[in-house]
Image (cartoon, rainbow, N blue to C red):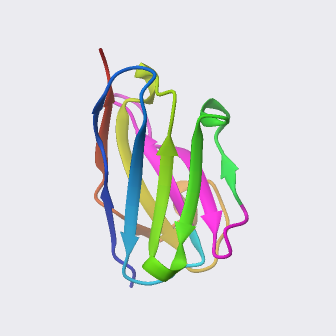
Amino acid sequence: QVQLVESGGGLVQPGGSLRLSCAASGRPFVMGWFRQAPGKEREFVARVTWGGGGIDYVDSVKGRFTISRDNSKYTMYLQMNSLKPEDTAVYYCAADPQRIGIRERDYDYWGQGTQVTVSS
């Protein structure tokens, strides 16, 4: 069983930056970020595998978001730059011991989410 706790959300102006963190109780092989905007389904944002490889992003955040993990601290990060109003969502951390995927069902463990609001 892996427990995940997100932090770092908040209110930021368009063009601003935020860094999300996800603290894990273990070191799962795959960790990822998903987000859910009001009235929309939860969508994949980014994922990273154990060694820092296996990185993938949804097209809408490529070049603006950077995912990373520090296994010594059991923590994953999402650096979000050039934020846009359409990035507003609840961001969820997810993890899985073996599956490498971008679908919700590829992840067994989920955090409670952290709100990110991009607005002037």
Q: Is residue 30 left or right of residue 16?
A: right
Task: Report whether 116 appears left or right of 46.
Answer: left
Side of 53 relative to 98 (left or right): right
x and y, in percent, of residue 35 in the image = 43, 43
Q: Quadrant of the N terminus?
A: bottom left
Q: From the viewer's perspective, is residue 44 above or below residue 97?
A: above
Tell me where the magenta segment starts and ends, as one range: 31-54
Q: Residue at x 57, y 41 (%)?
A: 65
- 3 or 13, which lies in front? 13
Residue at the spot 50% in from the left edge and 82% down from the top edge: 72
Q: Residue at x 59, y 47 (%)?
A: 66
- The image position of residue 34, as x and y in percent, is 48, 49
Q: Quadrant of residue 101?
A: bottom right
Task: Decide if residue 115 is on the left or right side of residue 20.
Answer: left
Quarter placement of the C terminus: top left
The total of numbered circles placed on residues is 0
The one of 75 and 56 positioned closer to us in this rendering: 75
- In x, y percent, where is residue 46? 59, 50
Q: Magenta stretch: residue 40 in it?
A: yes
Query: Residue placed at 39% from the left, 58% from the top?
Result: 21
Magenta stretch contains residue 88: no
**Vertical arrangement, residue 82 with respect to residue 2, above or below:** above
Q: Which quadrant of the structure image shows residue 61?
A: top right
